[in-house]
Every structure is written in C-alpha cells, then in structure tokens.
Image (tube, rainbow, N blue to C red):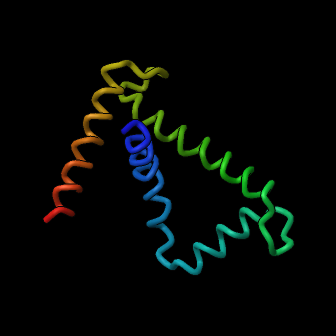
Amino acid sequence: MKKAILTAAAILAACPAWAQNADPALLIREQFAKIDTNGDGEISQEEFLAYKQEETKKVTAKIFEKLDTDKSGGISEEEYAQTVNTILSQLKKLSAGLAQ
C-alpha cells in the first residue's frame, strides 16, 4: 500500500510535464537525447542510472512541496495524513470507475 501511495504521488507530480509534449515521438527523442549524455546514440547503464537518480530527486522535491502545505519547510503528521487520505480517496474513485 505504501508503494502504491508513493507511486500515485509520483505520477501526479510528473503528469504536467508529460502534458506539455503531446507528440510521443518528440517526447521520446527529447528524453533519449537527455539521457544519452555522451551523444553516442546509445544509453549506457551509467547514463540511465544517473538520469533516473536526478529525475527521482526532482519528483521527490515536488512531492515534498505538495506535502508541506503550510510551506514551513517540514511536513507535519497532519499534512502527511491529509495528502495521503486525498490520494487514497482519488485511488478509490478511480478503482470504482474502472470496476464499472
């Protein structure tokens, strides 16, 4: 359940970036070029890991900003619970919609 919540939060945080590039082929070319830092036309394991680590940091920072609703620089238990409950509610609605 914890992984599902974190995954949902990560997806919610990343979706606006995807919406900016409606053309999948363009998105693929841009992402590939960004990951292939040495420009050799192939993504090495090192390049892929470095890219994923940087993206994870960005997504995690966005999630933290969303959780810190009072912008205090810290996440209280109340803030955390509120956000998790919102995500769970949205997942339940989505699940109910898919079940129909």
Q: Residue furthest left?
A: 100
Quarter of the figure that contains the C terminus: bottom left
Left or right of 60? Residue 91 is left
Q: Could you say which is closer to the camera, residue 49 or residue 15?
A: 49
- How many numbered discs, if any? 0
Residue 69 lies left or right of residue 99; in this view the side is right
> Residue 96: percent from the left, percent from the top?
16, 56
Query: Where is residue 81 shown, x and y percent of the image?
Result: 30, 27
Task: Return the x and y of residue 70 as percentages of the image width and height.
Answer: 37, 25
**Which residue appears at 70% of the width and 53% of the height?**
51
Q: Nearer the viewer, residue 95 or 18?
A: 95
Up/down of 65 relative to 76, above or below: below
Residue 88: % across, % down: 27, 41
Examine the rendered structure and indicate whether residue 67 appears above or below residue 51.
above
At 23% from the left and 56% from the top, the residue drawn is 94
Q: From the viewer's perspective, is residue 77 above or below residue 3?
A: above
Q: Residue at x 57, y 81 (%)?
A: 25
The answer to whether 72 appears left or right of 92 in the picture is right
Q: Nearer the viewer, residue 43 or 76?
A: 43
Dividing the picture into quarters, in which one does residue 99 lie?
bottom left
Q: Nearer the viewer, residue 22 or 53?
A: 53
Quadrant that contains the N terminus:
top left
Tell me which residue sits at (32%, 34%) in the image.
83
